[in-house]
Image (tube, rainbow, N blue to C red):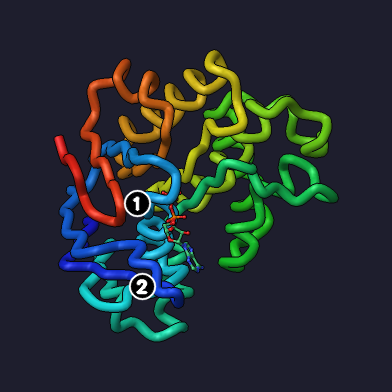
């Protein structure tokens, strides 16, 4: 499902953000990516989601060779994954419903199909009743659930979450992790970067730790 083979990423400076990273993740796995600030977690996610290419090495995700793929193919690939960020990144001027509908509209789905899928996924994250509200009328935890609904509405094979609980207190962080585990139980591969080690310890999942751009632990 996800294969990194001897991946290096060097930024001008030079900063060696990733150094010889190799890893293999099967379909349906739940993985925590940990490591201190500056370790290379965001860089790894940028490679994984096709936002950027490695300086050398191979990245393959869901059957796509992201190192060799052309921009059209990458755009196609990006429609098949879901991404969640620490700061939610919802569109302020649009309602909850409209935010969640965006990926389906980009794919040109019919309005009836969009409505059914959005209502269904909002139900699953427990926010159907917030559908007509705007993001700023919601709490941080609710906004992140909307962002997760948006990331899942097109039924991606992989969900990538970069510090999804970074702006939330511990009770809400637990709720968001429960939701991500539920999503994983339904078959989606879930890859979560976090530096909340307490949260990682409480859930017995595969943990990949990265330090100085290298894999320091994988268990
Ligand atoms: P993390 O997400 O683990 O905090 P990052 O992947 O953001 O780490 O950063 C890894 C290293 O690469 C850091 O030293 C950071 O300063 C550097 N870096 C990240 N993005 C860029 C960039 N666009 N240009 C130059 N250096 C960068």
Q: Nearer the viewer, residue 43 or 84?
A: 43
Relative to 11, say whether 69 is above or below.
below
**In front here: 23 or 66?**
23
From what the image shows, is residue 195 above or below residue 191? above
| Residue 139, percent from left and from top | 73, 25
Judging from the image, what secondary structure is the residue with disc 1 in? loop
Asked whether, in this view, residue 124 is left or right of residue 200, the answer is right
**179 or 204, which is in the foreground?**
204
Q: Are marks 1 and 2 in contact (CB under 8 Å)?
A: no
What residue does disc 2 label? Answer: 10
Position of 93 relative to 122 (above/below): below
* Mark 2 CB near ligand 1 (8 Å cut): no
Quarter placement of the C terminus: top left
- The residue indicated by pointer 1 is 157
Single out the residue that lies furthest toward the front: 13
The span from disc 1 to disc 2 (Cα, nearest Å) is 29 Å
Residue at position x 28%, y 71% from top? 64
x 76%, y 28%: residue: 138
């Amino acid at each position: 499902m996800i294969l990194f083979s001897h991946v290096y990423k060097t930024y001008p400076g030079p900063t060696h953000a990733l150094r010889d990273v190799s890893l293999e993740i099967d379909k349906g796995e739940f993985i925590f990516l940990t490591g201190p600030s500056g370790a290379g977690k965001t860089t790894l996610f940028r490679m994984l989601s096709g936002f950027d290419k490695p300086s050398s090495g191979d990245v393959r995700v869901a059957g796509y060779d992201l190192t060799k793929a052309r921009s059209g193919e990458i755009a196609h690939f990006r429609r098949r994954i879901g991404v969640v960020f620490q700061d939610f990144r919802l569109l302020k001027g649009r309602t909850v419903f409209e935010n969640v509908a965006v990926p389906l509209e980009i794919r040109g789905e019919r309005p009836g199909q969009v409505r059914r899928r959005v209502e269904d996924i909002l139900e699953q994250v427990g926010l159907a009743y917030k559908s007509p509200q705007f993001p700023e009328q919601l709490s941080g935890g609710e906004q992140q659930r909307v962002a997760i609904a948006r990331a899942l509405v097109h039924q991606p094979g992989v969900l990538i979450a970069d510090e999804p609980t970074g702006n939330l207190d511990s009770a809400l962080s637990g709720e968001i992790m429960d939701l991500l585990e539920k999503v994983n139980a339904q078959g989606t591969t879930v890859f979560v970067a976090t530096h909340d080690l307490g949260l990682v310890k409480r859930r017995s999942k595969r943990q990949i730790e990265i330090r100085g751009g290298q894999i320091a632990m994988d268990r």
